[in-house]
Image: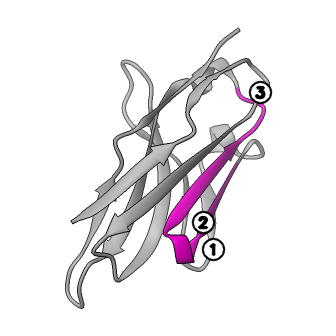
Amino acid sequence: QVQLVESGGGLVQPGGSLRLSCVASGNIRSINAMGWYRQAPGKQRELVAVIGSGGRTNYADSVKGRFTISRHNAGNTVYLQMNSLKPEDTAVYYCNAECKTSLWASRTYWGQGTQVTVSS
């Protein structure tokens, strides 16, 4: 069993910053990619940023230059530093991780989500 737990969401004014964290725990042999997605009301879930096990990153165009994804492999943790936040960044943010749980089994797990609200 693998669990992902996010933290760090909240209410922030436009132009402000937040840092999200996500810790993966359980029967994990290794983790490949880790990422952050978000879903705003009435919209589909979309990719925000992803980071590979070697540190290679990819970002949605809408967050490039404002958000930074990073990870601490030893702690099975992924972070999302969000700066210059805009009202359109308001959404529930989910982390996911591609976890290898045995020599033959690998799948993607999701966290429960954390709300980020950008409003004055």
Q: Position of residue 37 (x, y in %)?
A: 46, 44
Please state the extent of the stretch shown in magenta in the rendering: 68-85
Q: Position of residue 120 (x, y in %)?
A: 71, 8
Colouring of the image: one colour
C-beta proximity under 8 Å, tags 1 and 2: yes
Q: Quadrant of the N terminus?
A: bottom left
How many neighbours does mark 1 have within 10 angstroms: few (below 14), some (14-19), or many (20 or more)?
some
What whole-number distance in Å separates the C-alpha atoms at marks 1 and 3? 26 Å
Asked if 1 appears above or below 21 in the picture, the reply is below
Amino acid found under the numbered disc labelled 1? Gly
Q: Earlier in the sequence, mark 1 or mark 2?
A: 1
Please report the residue visible at 69 percent of the width from the left and 47 percent of the height from the top. 81
**What residue did someone put label 1 on?**
55
**Disc ID at residue 16:** 3
Q: In terms of depth relative to the viewer, which is nearer, 26 or 89?
A: 26
Q: Residue furthest top?
A: 120
Determine the CA span between mark 3 and mark 2: 22 Å
Task: Identify the mark nearer the N-term, 3 or 2.
Answer: 3
Mark 2 = which residue? 71
Q: Residue visible at 49% across and 69% down?
A: 76
